[in-house]
Amino acid sequence: MSYSQKHVDALCQALQVMQSGNSEDSPYAHSYIDELLSLIGSYKSGDMKPDEMFEQVMIGLVSFQQFLDMRLTLLERKQNPPVTW
């Protein structure tokens, strides 16, 4: 097993642990981690090149961050008084 393969396997293990801990409390994070694991699986099987995987991971990350930002903004606006920065 190569050095980088060990890191990929360690990342998968860490993601699986995180995913198992949030399946009920955070379905959105659970879904995103599932997407990451799928992308890594495609990379490990040779169906995806590293740069393709990185691109998809970054697109998913920015999308998830925007989703979280939108949710937080909505919650802040509902507070009385609304949260301002």
Image (cartoon, rainbow, N blue to C red):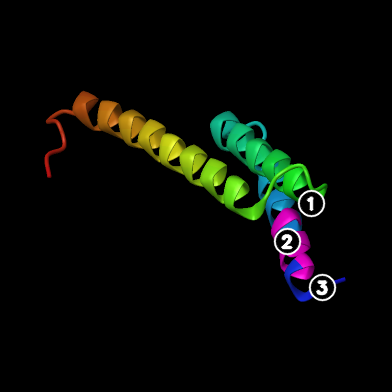
Q: How far apart, in angstroms, are the residues tagged by discs 2 and 1?
A: 8 Å
Residue 33 percent location from the top left of the image: 63, 41
Amino acid under disc 1: Lys
The answer to which of marks 2 and 1 sits earlier in the sequence is: 2
Residue matched to label 2 = 8
Q: Nearer the viewer, mark 2 or mark 3?
A: 3
Residue 28 percent location from the top left of the image: 55, 31
Q: Secondary structure at mark 1?
A: helix
Amino acid under disc 2: Val
Residue matched to label 1 = 44
Q: At 78% across and 61% down in the image, what residue appears?
A: 9
Residue matched to label 3 = 2
Residue 20 percent location from the top left of the image: 73, 43
Task: Work out whether residue 61 or residue 70 is closer to the camera in this orientation and state it.
Answer: 61
Question: Is residue 28 part of the magenta span, yes or no?
Answer: no
Residue 31 percent location from the top left of the image: 62, 32
Question: Local crowd at mark 2 within 10 Å, few (<14), some, or many (≥20)?
Answer: some
Amino acid under disc 3: Ser
Question: Local crowd at mark 3 within 10 Å, few (<14), some, or many (≥20)?
Answer: few
Q: Secondary structure at mark 2?
A: helix
